[in-house]
Amino acid sequence: MSRSPEATMDQPVYACFFSVMGITAAIVFTTLGAAYGTAKSSLGIASMSIKHPELIMKAIIPVVMAGIIAIYGLVVAVLLAGSLSPLYSTFRAFLNLGAGIAVGLSGLASGFAIGIVGDAGVRAAAMQPKLFVGIVLILIFAEVLGLYGLIVAIYLFTK
């Protein structure tokens, strides 16, 4: 029978908990942001499609962009989960917690922005087609907020 490694001051038994909380924060908050962005922009698509059903495929852009936010959280969660071990240094555990919170909360904010812009944007673009390019640019800037969190999370993970 093999013995499990002993906990030390640098590797307490509870350190892994903080890493798991980082994994949880990454997937939960980015998924909440993606869900909100999808739901909010879908309301705009549904109301716009009553008068302009031919524009539904153009209007689906915010829904796709909101779904990408959840992928950011999934990538970070899988990276962090792959590095789990029974004993973890507190430094590594808090880095992983920070990585999960960084991508999670930035994904949540990004999803909110995509949902609000997507809802108003698809309605406005249906009334004035010249607004479409501007709306897409605003959506890109909203999406980049989540990408910033992904970059910070990967940077923290590689420390």
Image (cartoon, helix red, strand yellow):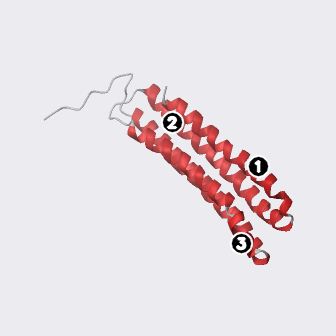
Which numbered disc, 3 or 2, marks the residue that appears first in the sequence?
3
Residue 38 position (above or below residue 47): above
Query: How many other residues sit within 10 Å of disc 3, few (<14), some (14-19) or many (≥20)?
Result: some
- Residue type for callout 3: Ala
Residue shown at the point (55%, 35%) measured from the top left: 153
Q: Nearer the viewer, residue 7 or 121?
A: 121
Q: Which of marks 1 and 2 is in front?
A: 1
Under mark 1, the amino acid is Leu
Where is residue 143? Give x, y as percent: 67, 47
Identity of the residue furthest to the top in this view: 9
Residue at image x 72%, y 68%? 45
* Label 3 residue SS: helix
**Mark 1 → mark 2, Cα distance in angstroms:** 32 Å
Q: How many C-alpha atoms fall within 10 Å of the one at disc 1: few (<14), some, or many (≥20)?
A: few
Q: In this view, does 133 lie to the left or right of 39?
A: right
Q: Label 1 belongs to which residue?
A: 137
Q: Residues within 10 Å of mark 2 (few under 14, many from 20)?
A: many
x, y (%) of residue 150? 58, 39
Mark 3 or mark 2, whichever is nearer to me? 3
Name which quarter of the figure residue 17 lies in.
top left
Q: Where is residue 56 in the image (x, y as percent from the top left)?
A: 70, 69
- The answer to whether residue 31 of the structure is visible from this angle is yes
Disc marking residue 46: 3
Residue 102 in sight in this render: no
Residue receiving disc 2? 97
Measured Cα–Cα span from mark 1 to mark 3? 22 Å
Q: Which amino acid does label 2 sit on?
A: Leu
Q: How far apart are marks 3 and 2 (CA)?
A: 38 Å
Mark 2 residue element: helix
Residue 47 position within the rendered picture, expressed as x and y whole percent measured from the top left: 75, 73
Sequence-first disc among 1 and 3: 3
